[in-house]
Amino acid sequence: MRLMKLLLLVSALLIACRGERDSQESSGTSVIEIDGTQLPQRSTLNSRAKEMLKDWPAFQELEKSFEALYRVENNEDLILVVEEMIKRQNDLEDSEYPEAFDIPHVKSRQKVFKTYLLKLKAASEYRTEVVSPAREMLEAYNAFLEQFNIVVNDTLDLNLILDE
């Protein structure tokens, strides 16, 4: 009887330990998939804004880095793309803005974009859900682009209003 109890206890212990090891392995190697079709498309700039931004190399480099985001297939690719985007965003932040866009409206949208870009980086590095932070980052970037359109379409002269 003792032998039977001992054998039952040892087998239960082995089964329990093996189950814990499997769950630890699966949590340590989680693969986060992101599909470019789940992400919103980037806003388009109108022709006047494109013309003003074509001579801003830092902005053009940031635009090019977005193309890779839609081709990401796994978490490691996402981390590399996001790091490249952060580098391009920092270059943009340090560069000289075109005169029409060197205003707080544009710079504040860029800060919001940077915040969500860093949130996406954290989510990808910690291997948590990345689709929601990626959507938020793209929405912030679209607001950044829309601000360029608003600035070039704004024909209201603030000096006339302030002088009266």
Image (cartoon, rainbow, N blue to C red):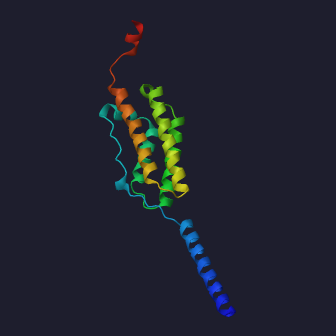
Q: Name the residue at 34% across, 55% down.
A: 37
- Tell me, yes or no, if residue 159 can be seen here: yes
- Return the residue found at the far left: 47
- Return the residue found at the far top: 164
Image position of 145 (left or right of 23): left
In which quadrant of the rendered image does the N terminus lie?
Answer: bottom right
Image position of 129 (left or right of 37): right
| Position of 158 relative to 92 (above/below) | above
In which quadrant of the rendered image does the C terminus lie?
Answer: top left
Q: How many marks?
A: 0
The one nearer the camera, 58 or 149, is 149
| Position of 100 relative to 109 (above/below) | above
Quadrant in the picture for residue 100: top left
Residue 78: percent from the left, percent from the top?
48, 56
- Tell me, yes or no, if residue 102 can be seen here: no
Quadrant in the picture for residue 16: bottom right
Q: Name the residue at 51% across, 55% down.
A: 80
Residue 26: percent from the left, percent from the top?
53, 69
| Position of 150 relative to 10 (above/below) | above
Q: Name the residue at 49% across, 64% down.
A: 31
Image position of 152 (left or right of 88): left
- Return the residue found at the far right: 2
The one nearer the camera, 39 or 52, is 39
Q: Name the residue at 55% across, 66% down.
A: 27
The one nearer the camera, 89 or 162, is 162
Residue 11: percent from the left, percent from the top?
61, 85
